[in-house]
Image (tube, helix red, strand yellow):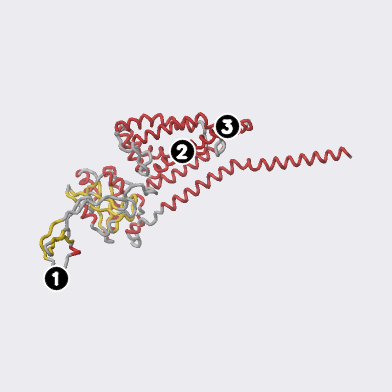
Amino acid sequence: MSNNKADNIERQPMVVVIMVLIMRLVIGGTFIFSGFVKAIDPWGTMYKVTEYLMTLGWEAMAEQALFIAFALPVIELLLGVAILFGAYRRSAPIAVLVMMAFMLPLTLWLAKTNAVPDCGCFGDALVLTNWATFGKNVFLTLGAVFLLMLGRRVPGVFGPAVQWMVMAATFLATMAIALPGYFTQPMIDFRPYKLGTKLVSAQPSVSGDDYLFIYEKDGQQHEFTIDSLPDEEDGWTFVDRREVEKKTPVAGERNRTLAVTDHGTDAADEVLDNDKLLLLLFPDLPQVSIATTFVINELNDKALAQGAKVYGLTSASDGQIAEWTDVSMAEYPMLVADDSDIKMMARGNPAVVYLENDSIRWKRTLGSISADVIHDNAVSISRMGDDMRPVDYLKRIGFFYVLALLAILVLNRTHLLVRPLFTRRHSSSKTSDSSLSSDSSKE
């Protein structure tokens, strides 16, 4: 039976084999990339899922957003790996088609209405327009139909007996990526507020030095900054000065604007004009447990003792801020910032961001900060993020995952290497026995 299947595979036109392999690579790679960037950032996936549920009017399901944020990347990665390696050659394309039966009409509706501007298919790593997302899903659907029809003609990398092992290894690797992203911070930061990013005020400001000074010489007037005033002994005569309003800084890869208000008054300059700055981020203040206040207040004391200024940032209402301040006995000012900026700057509710000279040095969820570290006076506030080495962690996960797949492959395919040797030895033995038998009969 297996020999007949092997013969059928060998008789397949080369163009069919090549097309199947290309479809496996493209569709599998797309699902793997989509699942990976979602698994890296469960908080971001949860925010996007919640946005979808609210837009569709499914508010009752919003409580399940976190579960969906973990389940979705797991499903996508399992399907992607299965398609890529040719595992479950019938059920995997069917599963993709079932998913596309929901996603195709949804993305077509989004393309027409733009109800959710960014589909979030690839997280913050790659932003597609809604029409591009719909086109992608059309291609994935056609590719899944192709693999369902012709995919079984080309064997997979792993045999049916060990395919579940590949799926189990993929599931474990996915959770190893997602859990630190939820409890600490995403190991790859696709957002604008990366480490080293400089935060600047989003509001134009004027200070006493923001003037241009007008001098005249030989009947011609020129403007000078305060750092380049001409020497009057050279014939220059002061005429006038005029204020120059600072322009709002342009946000870039290493320069992000931050708008902060205190009861409607701009407070960004006050916040950012600190060499050492600890920001406590509360993206959803009503959902913050009161049990966290003890740790927050101790962290506040540690930061102040080491010369850092502490502020709380939230998008909550004045009433919610007043209630939190009263219940938590917060000694740090609570200011208002844009909800999207708070969520992008760091993941967690609450989250902590530390800046030196306006640049982000480290960030993490409050829950990932050990109480022992807070109480240890030998650990400075600026070094509390040094234990996070996401690149090394990701390399280890990748190494062990590839090692696991190679071990499964060796376990599954060793017989293909051993069988020819055994067959050759068995054939030689038969030839030897036949020769001996022939010699014996001649005698």
Instruction: Give the mark toward the camera: 3 or 2.
Output: 3
* Residue 339 image offset from top left, x and y in percent: 26, 44
Q: Which residue is mark 1?
A: 233
Residue 302 appears anywhere in the view: no
Q: Earlier in the sequence, mark 3 or mark 2?
A: 3
Instruction: Pinpoint residue 427: horizontal percent, then vertical percent.
Output: 73, 40
Name the amino acid type tagged 1. Answer: Glu
Q: What's the amino acid at mark 3?
A: Gln
Q: Earlier in the sequence, mark 1 or mark 2?
A: 2
| Secondary structure type for disc 2 | helix
Q: Nearer the viewer, mark 1 or mark 2?
A: 1
| Quadrant location, the N terminus | top right
- Residue type at mark 2? Val
399 sits to left or right of 379: right
User: Given the current orientation, which residue lies at the most extreme left position?
Assistant: 239
- Report the front residue among 10 and 309: 10
Which sits in the foreground, 307 or 133?
133
Q: Residues within 10 Å of mark 2 (few under 14, many from 20)?
A: some
Q: Which residue is depicted at the point 35% across and 62% down?
A: 378
Q: Nearer the viewer, residue 118 or 174?
A: 118
Residue under circle 2? 26
Picture residue at 66% right of the left edge, 40% below the top:
419
Q: Give the image location of residue 382, x and y in percent.
A: 33, 59
Q: Count neighbours of disc 1 (C-alpha within 10 A) and say few if under 14, some if 14 to 19, many if 20 or more.
A: few
Q: Tag 1, which secondary structure?
A: helix
Q: Earlier in the sequence, mark 1 or mark 3?
A: 3
Q: Which residue is mark 3?
A: 12
Quick check: can you spot residue 242? yes
Q: Which mark is residue 194?
A: none
